[in-house]
Image (cartoon, helix red, strand yellow):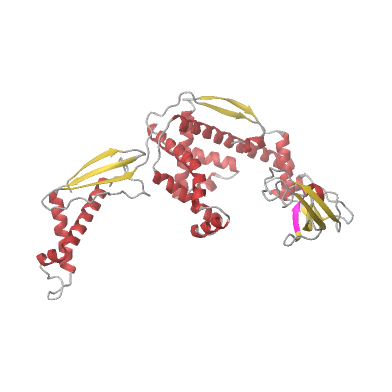
Amino acid sequence: MKITKEFTKLEKSAVKLTVTVAKEDVESTYKSVLGKYVKNAQIPGFRKGHVPANVLERKYGEALKADTMSEVIDSSFGEIFNDKDAENRPLPYAQPQMDVLPEFDLSKDLTYTVTYDVFPTVENVKFDGITVKEPQVTVADSDLDEELKNIQERNAMVVDKKDGDAAAKDDIVSIDFFEIGEDGNEVAGSKREDFTFTIGSGANLYKIDDEVIGMKKGDTKEITKTYDKDDTNAELAGTTKKLSVTVKTLKLRDLPALDDDLAQDVNEKYNTLDDLKKDLTKNMETAMGRRINELKQNSLLEQLVEKNAFDIPASMLAAELDGRWNMMAQQFQTSPAELEKMIVASGQTKEGMLEQWAAESEKMLKSRILVDNLLRDKNISVTPEEIEAEYGKIAEEGGMSIEEVKKHYDDPRSKEYLIDMVKENKLFEELYKQVKVSKGDKMSFKELFEAR
């Protein structure tokens, strides 16, 4: 097919494509379409497949033209973009738009114009003035103690407290309660029975953890509590509530001793508590390194997005928001349509939620676009040897064999994910050479994972 094409760049990563198809190809396509009509048409007075072409042209003239035009456009469009790496390729989730139908005349070339969105390009990325601060963190003894305490709690036995023992922080308490109105009677609908929570967790509606401390099994107590005007619970903010609370049960977590037996219960690969401690320290240091690297990358990308202004196509943002909505539906184990009903019932709207997500989603998309552009511009690639080295690193950090790691990444999609991760890590190592990397604030292990 003889084709001429012209691309014109528009705003927000859109492109106008003007295509001209030679009249010989238009005529050839018309004859092919007409032949199909002749073969399949059924008209009274004629046998199937023997209807004269001129009869069909009189009867189906406009349909023949429309089918020919559609086939010419589809064929030419496919031919233009038959190369996966072709420039100005349309985004997959936005159909090209044709505002004006082209003139169809078998004696002339066919010219049509479409507009569509393309993947944004960012040329000459600016790095000047960017400083990436690297948090200064070490795994302290207190951090290890916290991890050991978590292990103790996960392996604890929950047992009843002795009769006469008072409720204390971290006890598990089960209570009956109801709200008392101004008339001294129970407020209708406020009664709850066998409500269980851990004292000190704040996991109860009226936040009465401190008030329950000291109560014993079977005790009933009237509690009066005033809430701040800026309380996170709008229904409680600025109010005073009077409650009747009865303790039904009191339990405590019987923590196991920190010894070799506990270590062996956690995993048979540990012989002693010291083995467990060493492994925990190693895992925490690995997690610390990953988190620091994540924060550095996020900081660099945020600054690059601010310094290199560019627009993203509306269709790209819409697709991202739609994907995020569908993922939220999956998390709630429901359909997108049912999720919208749930959101409306809660007093919100889908449109409102998507609007709240838009700024964050746009920033994330721009970060990904910058990374993709820089990977291409810097021609970042990975070798089989580098992938083998990554297998070894993952195996060492995860306490697995290299064979186990390779089996995990045996799936083509998983392998592609690993390759992309190694590419991006190589890219950032290159980018850090173009910006200033300095020591950041000192922070604890816990603060590191709370940082944004």
x, y (%) of residue 256?
Answer: 78, 48
User: Which quadrant does the C terminus fall into?
Assistant: top right
Number of on-image labels: 0
In the picture provided, is 411 more to the left or to the right than 249?
left
Q: Is residue 256 visible?
A: no
Front position in the image: 435 or 322: 322
Residue sitting at 15 percent across and 75 percent down?
Answer: 44
Residue 349 vs 451, above or below: the answer is below
Residue sitting at 26 percent across and 43 percent down?
Answer: 17
Seen from this angle, which residue lies furthest right?
164
In the picture provided, is 293 more to the left or to the right than 102?
right
x, y (%) of residue 216?
Answer: 86, 54
Front position in the image: 168 or 58: 58
x, y (%) of residue 211?
Answer: 81, 49
Magenta stretch: includes residue 38? no
Magenta segment: 195-199
Residue sitting at 17 percent across and 72 percent down?
Answer: 42
Residue 275 vs 156, above or below: the answer is above
